[in-house]
Image (cartoon, helix red, strand yellow):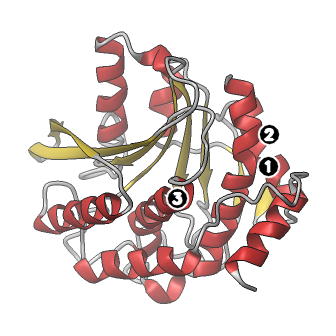
Amino acid sequence: MTPALRVLLITLAAGVGAGAIGPAFDSGRAYEDLRQLVAIGPRPSGSPGIQQTREYIKRQLTAAGLTVDEQRFEAATPLGPVPMVNLRATLPGAARGRGRLVIGGHYDTKLFREFAFVGASDGGSSAAFLLELARALKGRTNALPIELLFLDGEEAVVEWRGTDHTYGSRYYVQEARRTNAVQDIRAFILVDMIGDRELTIRREQNSTGWLTDAIWDAAHRLKRPEFLDAHTPIEDDHLEFLAAGIPSVDIIDLEYAAWHQPDDRLDRVAAGSLQAVGDVLIAALPAIEARLK
């Protein structure tokens, strides 16, 4: 199926007229980004690998015509201070002064000393997805500005307990609170571990109801079996936003068999899984924007 035909089918399924062809998510390009990221190797926070990853992300966003902003900070971790960097790029929106929609995911990988963890789905898929989303949406007329947020420090440096996790999202929200800008973040959509060949995405129990419904309604219209109606609670970057009163949703496959395993490699992920999430999220945008106007 050609990208143009796929977009036509998506827009028709979403109830949009055939003359209003929307943006196309190209999973082939997304998979190539994923391949390039995995080729870098392990990419834990503060490492040479994550610095190379940042440079790759910035090159791709710049090539898409976007300006990249770095949010640098030093995180206090169980292993001492670690420099971290969130990356942000914003697509313009028609309604100025009404805040922005933020779509984010992490680009770091878990630190393992026992093996080389390259995080194809866990860290790689979300970063690659956001890069292709930037290309897909750059020509769209967005109702609100859409900020693409690449979060550092989602992974625990040692073990997921206390505050040893979600460093980037915690700092991002803290800065929004400090500058009285929380109200400008109208909603937050998180993608995490979406590359699994056998993709299974359940409704995340902590997520905002109407935002979850908008995405799952789009999945039902597109007949995407990867999105299940069963609920499951998950701790992830979206909790920092929810704690600040920001409507948030987590799109994640936590049933990924290679999660935090040495075999979280390219042969465990598929372009089709990235395509499924890309098609659904783009199809859900009109309903989300209508709610936020």
Mark nearer the N terminus (3 vs 2): 3
Which amino acid lies under the numbered mark 2 shown in the image of this protein? Asp
- The reply to whether residue 209 is in sight is no
Residue 72 tag number: none
Q: Quadrant of the N terminus?
A: bottom right
In front of the other: 105 or 23: 23
**Quarter of the image where one finds residue 194:** bottom right
Is 53 or 11 nearer to us in this picture? 11
Q: Is residue 110 above or below residue 14?
A: below
Q: Amino acid at mark 1?
A: Trp
Q: Residues within 10 Å of mark 1 (few under 14, many from 20)?
A: many
Q: Which residue is mark 2?
A: 213
Query: Mark 2 and mark 1 in contact (Cβ < 8 Å)?
Result: yes
Q: Secondary structure at mark 2?
A: helix
Q: Is residue 78 rendered to the left or right of residue 234?
A: left
Secondary structure found at label 1: helix
Name which of mark 1 and mark 3 comes first in the sequence. Answer: 3
Q: Which residue is mark 3?
A: 133
> Is 232 or 141 nearer to us in this picture?
141
Along the line of sight, the residue nearer the viewer: 189 or 135? 135
Location of residue 179 in the rendering, given as x and y in whole percent from the top left corner:
30, 13
Report the residue at 65% width, 35% height from top: 207
C-alpha separation, residue under disc 1 versus residue under disc 2: 5 Å
On the image, numbered disc 1 is attached to which residue?
Answer: 216
Residue at the location (32% across, 74% down)?
37
